[in-house]
Image (spheres, coloured by chain):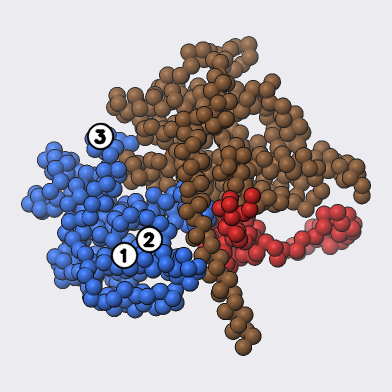
Amino acid sequence: MNLAYTLRLADDALIIGHRLSEWCGHGPILEQDIALTNTALDHLGRARSLCQYAAEQYNAATAEEKKNSFSSVAIQQLTEAGKQLTEDDIAYLRDGWDYRSLLLLEQPNIDWAFTVARAFYYDTFNYYFFSHLKNSNDTTLAAIAEKSLKEVTYHLRWSSEWVVRLGDGTDESHNRIQQAINELWQYTGEPFVMNDADNVAVSTGAGVNLADIQPLWTARIAEILQEATLTMPPAGSWMQQGGKEGRHTEHLGYILAEMQYMQRTYPGMEW
Amino acid sequence: MTNDKLNNSKNEWPLWEVFIRSKAGLDHKHAGSLHAADAQMAIENARDVYTRRMEGVSIWVVESKHIQASDPGEADSMYDPASDKIYRHPTFYNLPDEVKYM
Amino acid sequence: MSVHSFQEHFDNLIDRDVTIEPKDWMPDDYRKTLIRQISQHAHSEIIGMLPEGNWITRAPSLRRKAVLLAKVQDEAGHGLYLYSAAETLGISRDEMYNQLHTGKAKYSSIFNYPTLTWADMGAIGWLVDGAAIMNQVPLCRTSYGPYARAMVRVCKEESFHQRQGFEIMLTLSKGTDIQRKLAQDAFNRWWWPSLMMFGPPDAESPNTEQSVRWRIKRFTNDELRQKFVDVTVEQARVLGLEMPDKDIKWNEERGHYDFGTINWSEFYNVVKGNGPCNKQRIEARRKAWDEGKWVRDAAMAHAAKRKARQSEVKAA
Ligand SMILES: [Fe+2]
Ligand SMILES: [Fe+2]
Ligand SMILES: [Fe+2]
């Protein structure tokens, strides 16, 4: 069973999709409003596939496994009532501590530069991650990776081009993107931290050894930043972590309050 | 009021015409237009704007200002002379029914 | 050709139902009317993203979230196609934005109403997109080529909008008491503004006759409004919702439903800027545009730098 591993990937997709969807209707120009929404829809689509797969695994698990999977009360109640979980239960009924997404992804949009920098860090990670996950012995994860890789390849192209455009654009854009690159840097260590879920998944052949992709990530980031005439933040600086263990920044609470509002207010209804 | 006061970009992103091949083997057809800062972005914007419903497999873009168009005022002299050259169309020729595959 | 014979040629094309293309000669009034109508329509699509955009992050299921996001994105596309059509008439998109942001340009008054509950996503899709489709389908055959072609694309995409809205309403109406209450409440609030979407009564709509001749408009406001009432009454019955108008009654003689009096003073006030959300809507658009300026400038600056470097390489 790769439930914990699946959930982490689902949560990443859900949270970044949520953040990008906040841009819809507010982009700097119509064409880019539409472009960013396409990306948000890709992430949301991946979130759905992964949430469905997570629900499937949970429903097939033993009572003991179920108990250890989540501490959210709403999920426990459904389980005690003998209900099968759906993708929506996974997304809407878990509390923040059961969310395993990267801290990077819940950081607010702030402006186009922060949105681009966040996407650039994550898309680069995703690109190498899914290139490896394609070979997972979990056939569902492998299939999702295969499909996602096509989408992510385009995302990476988009965010890399924007980093270059802003870095090598005007003085103002250069300063703004440099600031975003610097401030978000503290969240770029966490994607490569191997936790229990990672170790288990790697040992069974389902997951990706993050140590394999870190040098690829670093090289690619360095290459694009150089093309963008930007300075790479110093190696060895302090890195935030905790998202993968369910310890988040304050931002996640607000995201969930908004995202889960309907399901929490009107429990158990069809929409 | 100057452009700047109105908070326009001093230079609006140029306009591009988008041509899309809907499936392999067909011609590119005019799909519409959009704004982009450069050609590469124009192709990507075209992908995002005009192929969201799987409308295309190939995209051409050309900056609108480079399109040369014929003058509608000269339509008579441009196109009418072709109208009496019906011998260019295969249906102009009568063949006996026995002739197949022609 | 003299202006007179240009005019004759133009009238002739119009009468023969031939499309007018950007490079054709056209009367100034025709050009002005088209620019006004197309840009107003484009603005409506863009402003229209806002009330529904409100609910993307709060959608009650992942499926609904994806559908809503795709729908709002479509509206951005519609705005884009329509701005492009207007641009062929010699006005820039920037200029049209200026008109919108400075309050010079109008847009559909319906989008100045607030979206208060999830059921509003259903009511908007069902009623507002429904009314829009009714207005827009005839425009697929309008006399100005680029406008007609934009409308063909818009209408193709629009058909899923109304269906997803109706589906939301149907799910609510088959749901719990509170869900039916949400559906009825949304229906009550969106019904009258939807009727107003067809514009003032024909008697007060001076442009209609000229516009019909130019095929910029193919039916009058009242004709379309009546058609909308007739189909919506039937659909509301399927949903099991009560009509928000006690005067709705089948009129055997006319073969149509009679309906109550529309509050036109509310309509004119919302158009004038006194709707519940006029200020927020324009403010949101202006903010997006102003805050996007440095981004647009950066892209242009970068494109220029790249071009310069390329020609340097060529020269060397
Ligand atoms: Fe639309
Ligand atoms: Fe519309
Ligand atoms: Fe629509």
- For the question of whether residue A173 can be seen, the reply is yes
Q: Nearer the viewer, mark 2 or mark 3?
A: 2
Disc 3 crowd rating (10 Å Cα; few below 14, some 14-19, many 20+) is: few
Q: Which chain is brown?
A: C
- Residue at mark 1: chain: A
Tell me residue A26's x, y (percent): 46, 49
Of the residues shown, which amino acid type is indicated by label 1? Glu
Residue A222 left/right relative to C2: left
Mark 2–mark 1 CB contact (< 8 Å) = yes
Of the residues shown, which amino acid type is indicated by label 3? Thr
* Residue furthest to the bottom: C316
Q: Which chain is blue?
A: A
Q: Nearer the viewer, residue C226 or C294?
A: C294
Q: Quadrant of residue A210?
A: bottom left
Residue A186 left/right relative to C222: left
- Residue at mark 2: chain: A
- Return the disc, 3 or 1, that comes first in the chain's sequence: 1
Query: Which residue has dot 1 on it?
Result: A183
Is residue B14 placed above or below C33 in the rendered structure? below
- Return the disc, 2 or 1, that comes first in the chain's sequence: 2
Residue C72 left/right relative to A218: right
Residue under the image location 38 percent in, 40 percent down:
C55
Numbered disc 3: secondary structure:
helix
Cα–Cα span, label 3 and label 1: 36 Å
Query: Which residue has dot 2 on it?
Result: A114
Is residue C204 placed above or below A231 in the rendered structure? above
Give the colour of chain B: red
Mark 3 and ligand 3: say if the CB distance to the nearest ligand atom is below 8 Å: no
Is residue C52 placed above or below A147 in the rendered structure? above
Q: Quadrant of the N terminus of chain A?
A: bottom left
